[in-house]
Every structure is written in C-alpha cells, then in structure tokens.
Amino acid sequence: MLSHSSSVIRASIVAALAVVAAAFGPPATSSASQMPEAAAAPGGFLFATFRGESGPMGEQVYFALSRDGRTWSALEEGRPALVSEIGEKGARDPYLLRAHEGDKFYLIATDLSIHHNRDWGRAVRGGSRSLLVWESTDLVRWSEPRLVRVAPDDAGCAWAPEAIYDVENGDYIVFWASTTERDAFEKHRIWAARTRDFREFGEPFVFIEKPTTIIDTTIVHDGQRYHRFTKDEKYKAITLESADRLSGPWVEQPDFSLAKLVGYEGPQCYLIEPAQGDRPPTWGLIIDHYAAGRGYQPYVTHDLDAGQFEPAEGFSFPFPFRHGSVLSLTAAEYDRLAAAAASGPGAIGVAGKTAPDPALAWTNPIVPQRADPHVFLHTDGWYYLAATVPEYDRIEIRRARTLGGLSTATPKVIWRKHATGVMGAHIWAPEIHFIDGKWYIYFTAGEAEQIWAIRLWVLECDGPDPLADEWVERGKLAVGWESFTLDATTFEHRGVRYLAWTQAVPDVRGTNIYLARMDTPTSITGDITLLTRPEFEWERRGHWVTEAPAVLIKNGRVWMTYSASATDANYCLGLLSAPDDADLLDASVWTKSPEPVLRSDPETGQFGPGHNSFTTTPDGKTDILVYHARNYERIEGEPLRNPDRATRAQVIRWRADGSPDFGPPVVDGPYVVPTP
C-alpha cells in the first residue's frame, strides 16, 4: 500500500512493529514500504492544501506540518510551496502519497484555476483532462510539475485525484471525478486509470457509479478493511462505504453519523494514533465546510467500521485549509521538513528555485476578509496589524517579523464589543499606535441599541507586549460634535501630535475630514480645521464620502490620503498635501488632487481599493501602501455586509517632483519589492 492511507497499515500490528524497529531495526521480512509506513504514525504529519480562488496563488499547493496530526503550522511562511505555471495555471485538491518501493513521494493535483477562468460551467464541460504530478525523494525538494492525460476523450474535467496501491494487481489505481459529453456533462462519476510510474497510464474506466453525481472520493485501509468516503453532489453530503477488498463489493454504512451534514466536501481520513495495548486507534476525519467558507472541520472515531464520529477538540489550522491530503511521516521525515522550514522560505519547493528575501516579498492578499488595515512597524522589529473583522464585533491584533508573515500570524483578540450600550456595534477601523511608552488603539463603534450612533473610542495598554498584556478602555475621544464620527488616525510632526478624523456635521451632506492638535493621546485641544469634503464627482458615487485619513511625511511635504465614495467598486483614494514647514491647521496650505490616486482596475482584478495605512520595509528605505480591496466587482446587497475586503500591500514609487505614485492596485499573487 502506498497512499497516505497506506501509511496507516494494520492498526493491530503498528505498535508491535514500532517496538521491533526501535529495539532491533527493521524486521527482515518487512518490505521497504511497510517499515516506513509502520513507524510513520508517531513521527508526524504533512498536509498539502490550497487556499481558494481569491487570487492566482490561492489555487496552488501549500504545506503544513504537525507533530500530532491535530495542531498544524504553515510551512514556507504560508506561501505556496509548489506552483503550477502549466496547463490552467492552478493546482487544487493536492494529494500526497508514498511510493510502494519507499524511494520517493508523489503529489497529484487538479489542473484548474477558477481565479483565471471565472467560469465553473466551463470548468465542468471544457476543463482540463489532465492531472498535475510532482515527485520528490525527500519531501523537501520537488521536481517541476508535469501534466499527465488521464480522462476519457469526451471528459469535461478531471477533478480531485487520489491514488492507492493495488496489492492484488501490483500497480496504482489513480481515481478522480469527471463529467462526459456522452451524458451532456450532467453527471460526475469517479473514473480511474492504472499506472506504475505516474507517467504512463492505462485506459480510463468508471471506478464508482452511483445514481447521483459524486466527487471527492478518498479511500483508507484500517488493517482489515477498506473504507471510502465520497461527496454526493445532489445532497452536498458525505457518504461512507466499506469493503474487504479494493475491488469490492462495497457496502454503504447506514449508520454513518455524519451523513446528514450538508455543505461539506473533500473528505480525508488518517490514523492519528495507532492502537496500543487496550487503547483503540484514533482515526481523524476532516471535511471541508466549503458552504460556510470555514475550511476543514475535524472529527474522530475509534472504529471506522462503526461509522460513529464525534467533533474533535484540540485541532488548529493556521488558515482555513481547503480540499487536500495528509501524509503520515517517519520521525526522520518530520525532522527533515522541520529543519528545512527553520532555514527560511524557499527551502521547501522545486529544486533549483530560490525564494526572494522574505522581508521584501509577500503574497497578495496578505490577509483575506480584513478591511481598513492598519500596519505599524514598531522599533522592536515586529509588524503589527489591526483591521476590521467581518463580524464587526471585536478587535484583534496579529504580528510578524515580515509583512508577508502577517498572512499566517495567529490573531489575538484583545477586546470584544459590549452587549449593551456604547461600544456595542459596528466595531470598525482599529489603528494601533505606540505613544510615550504606551500602546493605544483608536477605533470606531456604535451603540448596541443605536448601531449608527458612531463615535471614536480609545483602548490603552501600558505593558510592553500588546498581544499578552492587558488593555483597558479609556473612553470616548471627544471631538466637539455628538454626531457620526469615525476613522481616526494620529501622527506627530515637528514636535506636535495631531488627530485627523472623519465627521458628519449636522445639516451638512456627507462626511468631511478634520484635523486638530492633541494634548494627550486621548484628547484634542484648540482649533479644529476642515481639510476636505466631498467636492468631486468621484467622491460622491453611491454616497458623499471623504473618510479614513492616513499620513506619510516625505520629500518636504505632509501627504494625507483619504478614501472616497461608497464602499463598493466606487471606493478610491484621494490625496491632500501641505508643505512640511507650514501651519497644518491653516486650511489654505493644503492642496487636493483633482483625480483619485488609486482606483478600481479591471485589468488587475482589484476593486474598491481604499482605507489605507503606510509602513516601510524593515530597513525603512522603501515606503509601502497597505490597503483593502475586493478581487471582484459585482456585490450582491449592501457592500458593508460583504466580507471580502482583503488586506493588501504594494510599494509606493516617488516621482521626480517628489510626489507619490501609488500605481494601479497590483494583481493577486506573489509580490516582490522592486529593486531601485
């Protein structure tokens, strides 16, 4: 046996073989494949997955490592380890397996990119008939991918491939889901073909036929029987069947406890802990709750034949894993992968390819479903990110040594909304700052009973670690109006600290941006200056809006970006500026760009860019724009209820006259800081 399922050979003898191996070395009668597999369960686990359709790098192969099969850590700092630039330029549903001879590993995947093609109908009827294949001898360095044609000539697709070694026939059965023209592409079946080397394949044949459409089959052997889990597309549910032989007959398990779950796919089953003494084995079943966008959800059982699974505790994933696979590892394989990961990005992947400096590269979007991003590079060398969460109910912080590392950093919730009264709704636009030795977060909140009674509020932390130390509420930041108030930022210039914010003034249409001095980190003093209001047509699309100021001081000027119009594809960035030696509270010193400086761009696939902050590379030499955008234009319903504004970043170029050139919003995918 040699798929990841074969790594869980007879549970009844795993413990005994492990003891023999530890005491005497491999038994003389064990095959090369059996011995690594028998010792694999205690060693660790490797997960291969993809992330989704939000960008070209979402549909590529990501790896994660676990010692116990429950707690997973992303490899390559959450970047794709294997990238397909052939075929449809996407790799979904990656499946890992160990060769029967024990001398190599294979990874097979669906050749599909929904991000590039945007058409599920075409993917079903006119997609690729090939699979992607990578090979490795050590799980660290991999071959370039190749395409192998497997599906019949009239197939519309070849999805979710897996493989298992057929001990009776002495070859691999590779199986996948295809539609065919012969029945108008209306039904998926599980097809299969035989191979000995993953290069030459026999004629495809129907492997599993059901009355309804089926996809996403996986097969596991428990040492006595085979068990296969399949997604029934009609009911959007998972089925369980068992058989004594791979060739069948297969009998459906009528008491499968998860049969009524709806909206799940991509089942994967693996042995977490082998039987030991009187203790039964523990099997994990993870299924992708795609309908809710939650990724894999874990369940466990001690008896696959019984089919009774319970929700599992103690599982954690660095990001929502999508349809993928788990490979059991020996201790040596785990250690080799861990050592490669510790050596830095680029160590795991295609041999001969070097990764860029992680401090100067990231993948956009950096964090999906995080709007109004504020990134702060502290003197401790960490990047801190605070952003609006889609639920509008809490404030979280994450940090990383690199901007790209924020992608997989674990967020820490430091405050939640009140159940009643003020600070009880619409928790928006948190900004994290370090002022006079203390941490502050400025944020927007409504009242639980009056959700549009939006005001500015402040949290304070006087400890050195904002993720571990206590935060306290410092109350409302009063600005002189008891009306719609939001999106505050603070900056220091020439020894004076300022607050800039967004305000709706009674009886005046739209929202304006104001500026005032601060006498403490929680209060303003003196005159309040109106800097801008919605004047241009591009500031009045959907709503009359100028909001979310952000400040960058460079080249003799104070640059203030702001966001304009409704939060759909009309959202864009405007720009104000003033000489850095001027009185910033004198409105006449400020000039305003007549056109947006960053707007939606269908060519790059980014829409509604805005609500930004500024940061730099770790050396402080390169300025970076951090902002949110969606990667699709059309939004159903109210844009504020749409969760898909994602945190992104790109370098700011500076023109010869000293003004910033933000450029168009860049495409999704890997981004490397350009060399000067």
Image (tube, rainbow, N blue to C red):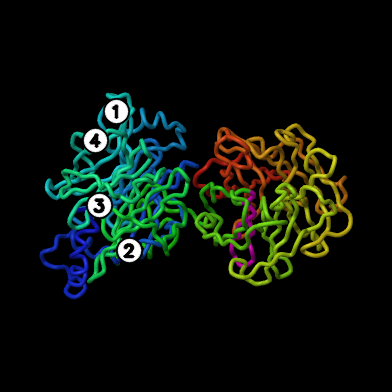
Q: Which residue is mark 2?
A: 44
Q: Earlier in the sequence, mark 3 or mark 2?
A: 2
Q: At label 1, which amino acid type do we have?
A: Thr
Marks 3 and 4, how far apart in space?
19 Å
Select label 3 or label 4 by which is in front.
4
Q: Earlier in the sequence, mark 3 or mark 4?
A: 4
Q: Earlier in the sequence, mark 2 or mark 4?
A: 2
Q: At label 3, which amino acid type do we have?
A: Val
Circle 2 residues within 10 Å: few <14, some 14–19, many ≥20: many
Q: Earlier in the sequence, mark 1 or mark 3?
A: 1
Q: Secondary structure at mark 2?
A: strand
Select label 2 or label 1 by which is in front.
1
Marks 2 and 1, how far apart in space?
40 Å
Circle 4 residues within 10 Å: few <14, some 14–19, many ≥20: few
Q: Earlier in the sequence, mark 4 or mark 1?
A: 1
Q: Residue 209, labelled with which disc?
A: 4
Quadrant of the rendered image containing residue 656: top right
Marks 4 and 1, how far apart in space?
13 Å
Marks 3 and 2, how far apart in space?
18 Å
Q: Give the x, y percent position of residue 363.
A: 51, 49
Q: Which residue is mark 1?
A: 180
Q: Tell me if I can see residue 453 in this picture.
A: yes
Q: At label 2, which amino acid type do we have?
A: Gly
Q: Give the x, y percent position of residue 184.
A: 32, 24
Q: At label 4, which amino acid type do we have?
A: Glu
Q: Which residue is mark 3?
A: 220
Q: Residue 387: say if magenta.
A: yes
Select label 3 or label 2 by which is in front.
3
Q: Is residue 257 above or below residue 92?
A: below
Task: Say which of 257 and 124 sits in front.
Answer: 257
Highlighted range, magenta: 372-388
